[in-house]
Image (spheres, rainbow, N blue to C red):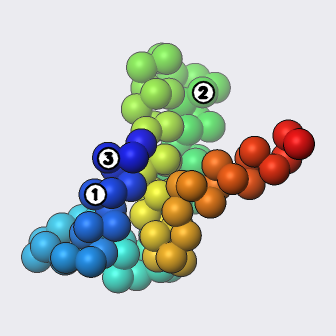
Amino acid sequence: MTELTTLIADRKANPKPGSYTNKLLADKNKAAQKVGEEATEVIIAALAQSDERVIEEMADLIYHSLVLLETRDLSWSDVVAALENRHR
């Protein structure tokens, strides 16, 4: 997870032409839309597809969620901290 969050932050700091991540980082609405699409795909996979497909769709959802966080200058660490605070 650290490697992926670092890659996304690096794309934001050092954009690469043609990068899908950069396209999402430049458009918060598109990033949010992709999170919604991927969440729907996770639900469909969980209800009617193979375990492998559930894992693939969940990976897509996590990636797009991390990009959306980065558009808001938030991080995975912020999410982990919120989860930890819920269990105190």
First reached walking from the N terminus: tag 2 or tag 3: 3
Which amino acid type is shown beneath numbered disc 3? Glu
Report the Cα–Cα distance between label 3 and label 1: 6 Å
84 relative to 29 in the view: left or right: right
Crowding near pointer 3: few (<14 within 10 Å), some, many (20+)? Answer: few
Crowding near pointer 1: few (<14 within 10 Å), some, many (20+)? Answer: few
Q: Are marks 3 and 1 in contact (CB under 8 Å)?
A: yes
Residue occupying image coordinates x 32% and y 46%: 3
| Residue 75 visible in the picture | yes
Question: Which residue is denoted by mark 1 in the rendering?
Answer: 7
Check the image and name the residue furthest to the front: 88
Residue 18 location, x and y as percent? 13, 72
30 relative to 3, above or below: below
Considering the numbered disc 3 on the image, is that residue within a helix, a strand or a loop? helix
Q: State the residue in front, 25 or 33.
A: 25
Residue 19 location, x and y as percent? 18, 67
Quarter of the figure with the C terminus: top right
